[in-house]
Image (cartoon, grey):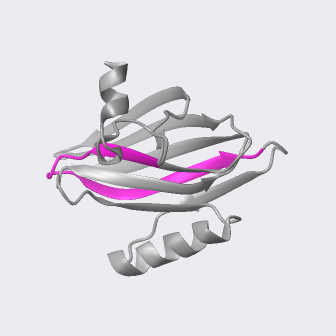
Amino acid sequence: MVEKIFNNKVDEAIYLIEKNSKEPIPLESIHFKVDILASLASFTMTQKYVNSSDDPLETLFLFPMDVDYAISKIIIDFTLPTGETRSLETIVDIKEKAEIKYEDAIAGGTKTAVMASFTKGQRDMMRVMIGNFPAQTTAVLKILYFQ
């Protein structure tokens, strides 16, 4: 199974991986919270990852998303080696504009950036990219969605 995963293209990631090498980023924990009110269900998926390398990473995560679901936001909380915390939250923007902002942020090498979009080949997969995931840092990724 592991060999099959590593032989897949980057666009077929099933967990958080380093974009270029396809190496998995260590997952420390995962938690789901579900709230149901009448005919509306809201979900929060929380995953904790660790960048144990000495370098910032660009990562990729594909999240299966049924067409009847809608993502309300993605929040990433980073805990740096100093104990300082930083938080990123997605905002809705025109795709081309968001891609430029993301590329500009990671090109500088100092800003952490997040971008999410549906994959080109599969409309039921959400692609989340985290650029400049700081070295020796934990990241708590929260995806909030509802049906």
Magenta span main SS: strand
Which residue lies most toward the right here? Answer: 82
Task: Tell me the residue at 51%/76% (across/down).
Answer: 101
- What x and y, as percent, mark residue 96? 36, 79
Residue 34 spot, x, y in % from top left: 34, 36
Q: Residue 106: percent from the left, percent from the top?
A: 59, 66
Q: Is residue 60 visible?
A: yes
Q: Using the image, determine if residue 131 lies above or below residue 96.
A: above
Viewer-proximal residue, 55 or 72? 55
Along the line of sight, which residue is nearer the eye, 19 or 136? 19
The magenta stretch is 60-80
| 90 and 53: which is toward the camera | 53
Residue 73 shown left or right of residue 67 in the figure? right
Residue sitting at x 41%, y 39%: 45
In the visual, does 35 lie left or right of 38? right
- Tell me, yes or no, whether the highlighted magenta stretch contains residue 73: yes
Name the side, left or right, on which 39 lies relative to 60: left
Residue at the spot 54% in from the left edge and 35% down from the top edge: 25
Determine the image quadrant of residue 2. top left
Q: Is residue 38 above or below residue 23?
A: below
Instruction: Give the residue at x 34% y 75%.
Output: 95
Residue 64 x %, y %: 26, 42
- Quadrant in which residue 120 is drawn: bottom left
Residue 142 inside the magenta-drawn segment: no
